């Protein structure tokens, strides 16, 4: 792996934030970056200029800031570090999965590349973190497939949970309390109109969750199969 350029913690966080905004198809404008990092918009443009001089980002008027290839490499290295640390904390140190994000936010800047690679090795080079997010390889390859969230599923659709946002531990605990975690099977039973609650079954249990929560859970929808006609002998079951 290439040596990491000497960057401040702050600069590294900017690169990661810009990567995430690009992934979400949002222009990484000053305000969006500021909001993402919880800093004042006034302080953002100076840092973007500095990163631009280092050749890590490119800012174009009206189009916002984008990562250059070297900038993207740094961002992906950081994301690899973050996700390996989270995996290690959960698998080896007994941390709860809803309790590792903030820890990883700090350690990702401090751990040496050797430590990260040792952690990955001990874990058997995992490909996903405890929240289902793909771990970029040391070479910077990552699965960037776009996933649908539960909020985007139509009533009647079944899906497997692949990944959830780990930014809010309370939300993770809330969802996990309803059985929603990577690998779980869900089925959307009904959706209230006007962005109302979503009724779904997880395993055999029925839950009602808000679209705001459902939007933080990404799934692999079952491939659409034509429903076979009901066999005549089927016993009717209550629809719950
Ligand atoms: Zn995290």
Image: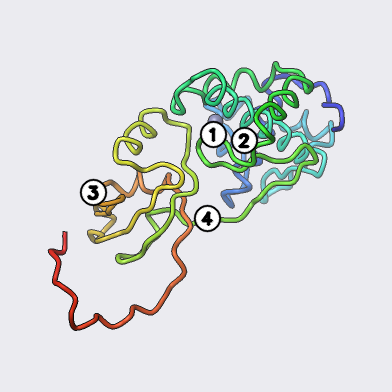
In the rendered structure, are the residues bearing label 2 and label 1 in contact, judged by CB atoms less than 8 Å apart? Answer: yes
Mark number, residue 13 = none
Q: Quadrant of residue 74?
A: top right
Locate residue 235, reporting x and y percent: 15, 72
Residue 109 is left or right of residue 183, and the answer is right
Q: Earlier in the sequence, mark 2 or mark 1?
A: 2
Classify 10 Å Cα crowding around label 3: few (below 14), some (14-19), many (20 and above): few
Numbered label attached to residue 36: 1
Q: Nearer the viewer, mark 3 or mark 2?
A: 3
Q: Nearer the viewer, mark 2 or mark 4?
A: 4
Q: Secondary structure at mark 1?
A: helix
Q: SS of the residue at dot 3?
A: strand
Q: Residue furthest right?
A: 2
Residue at the (43%, 54%) spot, across then down? 160
* Other residues around mark 4 within 10 Å, as few (<14) / some (14–19) / many (≥20): some
Q: Residue beneath label 3, please? A: 205
Q: Residue at x 22, y 50 (%)?
A: 206
Disc number placed over residue 147 in the picture, else none? 4
Tell me whether the residue at label 1 lies in contact with that at label 3, contact meaning CB atoms closer than 8 angstroms.
no
| First in residue order: circle 4 vs circle 3 | 4
Secondary structure of residue under mark 2: helix
Query: Which image quadrant for residue 42?
Result: top right
Q: Earlier in the sequence, mark 1 or mark 3?
A: 1
Residue 169 in view (yes/no) = yes
- Most foreground residue, 170 or 68: 170
Between the C-alphas of marks 4 and 3, the distance is 24 Å
Residue at x 66% of width, y 41% of height: 19
């Amino acid at each position: 792996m290439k040596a990491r350029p000497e960057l401040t913690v702050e600069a590294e966080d900017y690169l990661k934030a810009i990567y995430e905004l690009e992934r979400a198809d949002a222009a990484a404008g000053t305000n969006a970056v500021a909001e993402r990092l919880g800093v004042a918009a006034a302080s953002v443009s100076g840092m973007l200029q500095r990163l631009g001089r280092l050749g890590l980002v490119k800012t174009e008027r009206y189009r916002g800031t984008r990562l250059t290839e070297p900038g993207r490499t740094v961002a992906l290295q950081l994301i690899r570090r973050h996700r390996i640390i989270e995996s290690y904390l959960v698998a080896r140190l007994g941390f709860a999965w809803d309790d590792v994000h903030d820890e990883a936010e700090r350690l990702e800047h401090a751990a040496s590349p050797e430590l990260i690679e040792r952690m990955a090795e001990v874990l058997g080079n995992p490909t996903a973190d405890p929240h289902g997010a793909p771990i970029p390889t040391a070479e910077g390859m990552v699965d960037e497939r776009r996933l649908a969230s539960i909020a985007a599923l139509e009533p009647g659709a079944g899906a497997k949970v692949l990944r959830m946002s780990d930014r809010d531990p309370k939300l993770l605990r809330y969802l996990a309390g309803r059985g929603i975690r990577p690998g779980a099977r869900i089925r959307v039973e009904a959706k209230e109109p006007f962005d109302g609650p979503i009724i779904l079954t997880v395993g055999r249990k029925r839950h009602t969750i808000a679209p705001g929560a459902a939007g933080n859970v990404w799934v692999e929808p079952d491939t659409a199969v034509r429903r076979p006609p009901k066999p005549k002998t089927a016993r009717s079951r209550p629809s719950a």
